[in-house]
Amino acid sequence: MRIGILGGSFDPAHRGHALITREALRHFDLDQVWWMISPGNPLKREGPAPMAQRIAQAQQIMRDPRVAITDIEARLGTRFTADTLAHLQALYPGVRFVWLMGADNLVQFDKWDHWRDIMERVPIGVLARPGWRMRGRKARAARIYAQAELPARFSHALANAQTPAWSFVNIPMSPLSSSAIRAQGDWPRR
Ligand SMILES: Nc1ncnc2c1ncn2[C@@H]1O[C@H](COP(=O)(O)OP(=O)(O)OP(=O)(O)O)[C@@H](O)[C@H]1O
Ligand SMILES: O=C(O)c1ccc[n+]([C@@H]2O[C@H](COP(=O)([O-])O)[C@@H](O)[C@H]2O)c1
């Protein structure tokens, strides 16, 4: 079983998330994708909308039997991705997890807690995002792990590749972002 994990605030979820999820299922030959709705950074004064509101809205946006909308991190009590993945691998030893992210996150990836552990632990699938393709390719993490890049034409083999392994796929892109939706006032807190 090959499962992609798309972590995010989903505050709110939008069609860009749905698009990259479908593309990830196809390009990385995944059986499922789990949307992992993050509880929110406890250090931030302005947290995201309540979990129940974000989950209900995500379920409206993404209706696909291969996609699960989850609050795993809230249940596990983890905040950092490295910890979450360690827990998931211990809980599901038969699953090949792939961490999914937009190209914008690859740019900051080298600032994440134990980011090299994440690289060594799971394959990483990166999806193009408008304005971030070039910056993603030049990211420090991408440069340090240049040898571990699986060319896009082999992306279907990513989930079973030996780590470290990452692959960057060019896909039809969506300019949508949660921050733009919030700025338009289209996402009132309930
Ligand atoms: N339009 C998009 N194209 C590609 N990747 C995206 C897009 N929107 C979100 N993502 C990716 O989805 C994951 C979760 O994103 P998140 O929930 O933070 O949404 P966001 O639109 O990036 O939010 P914000 O604008 O508040 O930063 C991240 O890996 C992000 O890179
Ligand atoms: O573990 C970390 O240090 C870390 C730092 C930044 C982001 N992440 C994770 O990356 C995912 C996307 O985050 P965000 O803030 O872009 O919604 C989400 O699952 C976060 O928990 C994780």
Image (cartoon, rainbow, N blue to C red):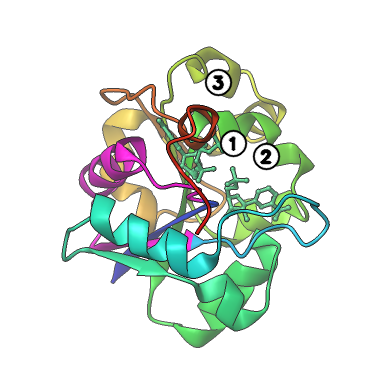
* 120 sits to left or right of 45: left
Tags 2 and 3 in contact by the CB under 8 Å rule?
no
Taking the spot 57% from the left edge, 61% from the top edge, the residue there is 38
Label at residue 105:
1
Kind of residue sitting beneath label 1:
Asn
Neighbours of disc 1 within 10 Å: few (<14), some (14-19), many (20+): some
- The answer to which of marks 2 and 3 sits earlier in the sequence is 2
Label at residue 84:
none
Kind of residue sitting beneath label 2:
Phe
Neighbours of disc 3 within 10 Å: few (<14), some (14-19), many (20+): some
Question: In the image, which residues are magenta?
Answer: 10-36
Tags 1 and 2 in contact by the CB under 8 Å rule?
yes
Which residue is under mark 3? 137
For marks 2 and 3, give the CA distance: 12 Å
Judging depth in this view, the residue of 96 and 55 nearest the camera is 55
Taking the spot 78% from the left edge, 54% from the top edge, the residue there is 113
Which residue is under mark 2? 109
For marks 1 and 2, give the CA distance: 6 Å
Q: Is residue 164 above or below residue 79?
A: above
Kind of residue sitting beneath label 3:
Arg
- The answer to which of marks 1 and 3 sits earlier in the sequence is 1
* 65 sits to left or right of 172: left
Cβ of disc 1 within 8 Å of ligand 1? Answer: yes
Taking the spot 29% from the left edge, 38% from the top edge, the residue there is 15
Judging depth in this view, the residue of 109 and 71 nearest the camera is 71
Looking at the rendering, which quadrant does residue 169 occupy? top left
Q: Is residue 1 above or below residue 168?
A: below
Looking at the rendering, which quadrant does residue 50 occupy? bottom right
Disc 3 is placed on an element classified as helix
For marks 1 and 3, give the CA distance: 11 Å
